[in-house]
Amino acid sequence: MKNFMLIFCTAVSFLSAEIIESSTIADMDKYKEEGVLFLYDIDNTLVTLPQDLGTDQWFQERLKTNRSRIENKQKALDRTLNEWAAFQQLSKPIEVEPGSDKIIKAQQDDHIMMMGFTTRGVTMSRNTIIQLEELGIDFSRSALIDHDYLFVQGRSVIYRNGVLFTAATHKGTTLFSFLDKLGINPRKIVFINDKWDNLRAVEETCEKRKIPFIGLRYGYLDERVRAFDSAVTDKQINRFESILSGL
């Protein structure tokens, strides 16, 4: 009997947290229910750029390059972030998956609790809101509070217009720190993100909090990410730096 109970409890624990592959935002609709909290990643889930320069996949490669050139890791990261932010602001955003805005609006009309949930930091928050608005996505319609909320979680984190900007802090810890401050206790969390690490960070924290979790590992842009060619973007950024130096 003891062995049976152990197996049963293990199965229940396993079923309470799950990460599955998804190729469409529409899969979020499968988990609509009272008390659920939908979390939407931004980069490569809702927003991307028409060119690779300045995208999330470019950032990862550019960081490696800068770290090979700059001995101080923090300076290498800061430079990469500044470069990435510049291209994000100079480029016109495009929707990752056509129709995502309509799906989110329909969920908001159904009064689903949701928010944008991104690694981006405070300094990129206003530009991010503008990017989302250009794509017809407005998380303020379903905002958990109607004002900006700034707090410190190792570094400054802000909730603005329905989006939590985690500033590269641990996503699970920061999420629940924010929810606890607001006194919000979701019955289930559903998180869509293109990166496994981000999903696992929230999954682990949900398990500790005994909150059911569904993670959707979003692969809509997988083919584009795999086709990324840093040689092409290196030439583009070299031309860009030449133009700036000549001004």
Image: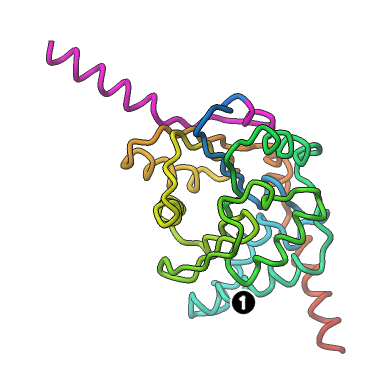
81 and 95: which one is in front?
95
Residue 20 in the magenta stretch? The answer is yes
Q: Quadrant of residue 80?
A: bottom right
73 versus 100 height, above or below:
below
Residue 152 in the magenta stretch? The answer is no
Q: Which residue is mark 1?
A: 79
Extreme front residue here? Answer: 146
- Magenta residues, as a range? 1-29
Q: Measured from the top left, where is residue 241 in percent x and y?
A: 79, 79
Number of residues whose C-alpha sits closer than 10 Å to that of mark 1, classed few (under 14), some (14–19) or many (20 or more): some
Q: Main secondary structure of the magenta part?
A: helix
Extreme top residue here? Answer: 1
Q: Residue at x 75, y 67 (%)?
A: 234
Q: Measured from the top left, where is residue 218 in percent x and y?
A: 62, 37
Q: Measured from the top left, where is residue 160 in percent x and y?
A: 61, 61
> For this view, does 83 lie left or right of residue 113?
right
26 versus 80 height, above or below:
above
Q: Residue at x 39, y 28 (%)?
A: 16
27 and 147: which one is in front?
147
102 and 46: which one is in front?
102
Q: Quadrant of residue 152?
A: bottom left
20 versus 209 height, above or below:
above
